[in-house]
Image (cartoon, helix red, strand yellow):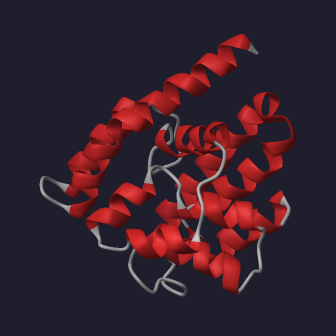
Amino acid sequence: MDVTRARDLARRLLEEPLPRRWAHSQGVAAQAERLAPILGDDAELLQCAAWLHDIGYSPTISKTGFHPLDGARYLRDVEHADRKLCNLVAHHSCALIEAEERSLDHELSEEFGVEDGELVDALIYCDMTTTPDGQETTAGERLSEILSRYGPGHVVSRSIERAAPQIQAAESAVRARLARW
């Protein structure tokens, strides 16, 4: 799948039913495009994953209510997308932690593998430094926004609290790579 097809698919699934999610996806993709110089051959794959990471929220494809799994399954089963792209969508932004909270970790792990650490960090960076409205932010601010939006005790809040160290480490790693470039 190329970037144009990924963007068009995300637009079709998100723009009308979930305009704020579409705005976020556009911002995440813009972040991915900015990382292209440090990613080499993986730049296009990251951009595709950035466009598609939240398609599992689309009401037309949501099955389990866990968007990383629903999005990756749709890409695999309907779009016949590349395995690496499906894996990135399935595991974006520490999704395995939330999968554990939802008792979906075995399904996620059995169906989708985890990709290279630098690529995973890059997608975490893009997602977690973009607001719900598509604006740039820091991972710390994004984590606070998520906790505020979902509130204490919510499955997403519990997951994001557990994932925070990994998210912040990914942000630091990507910023360090950008600084060396």
Between 74 and 134, the residue placed more toward the observer is 74
Q: Is residue 52 left or right of residue 34?
A: left
Between 87 and 175, the residue placed more toward the observer is 87
Q: Is residue 16 visible?
A: no
Q: Is residue 176 left or right of residue 166?
A: right
The residue that appears at 28% across and 45% down in the rendered structure is 162
- Extreme top residue here? 180
Q: Is residue 26 left or right of residue 94?
A: right
The residue that appears at 40% across and 83% down in the rendered structure is 64
The residue that appears at 24% across and 47% down in the rendered structure is 147
Q: How many marks?
A: 0
Say if 26 sits above or below 43 in the image: below
Q: Is residue 120 visible?
A: yes
Q: Position of residue 172 (x, y in %)?
A: 51, 23
Location of residue 25 (image quadrant): bottom right
Q: Position of residue 175 (x, y in %)?
A: 58, 21
Q: Position of residue 18 (x, y in %)?
A: 49, 71
Between 16 and 25, the residue placed more toward the observer is 25
Quarter that holds the N terminus: bottom right
Q: Position of residue 164 (x, y in %)?
A: 33, 38
Q: Is residue 47 left or right of residue 62?
A: right
Location of residue 131 (image quadrant): top left
Say if 70 sits above or below 48 in the image: below
The residue that appears at 57% across and 38% down in the rendered structure is 121
Quarter that holds the C terminus: top right
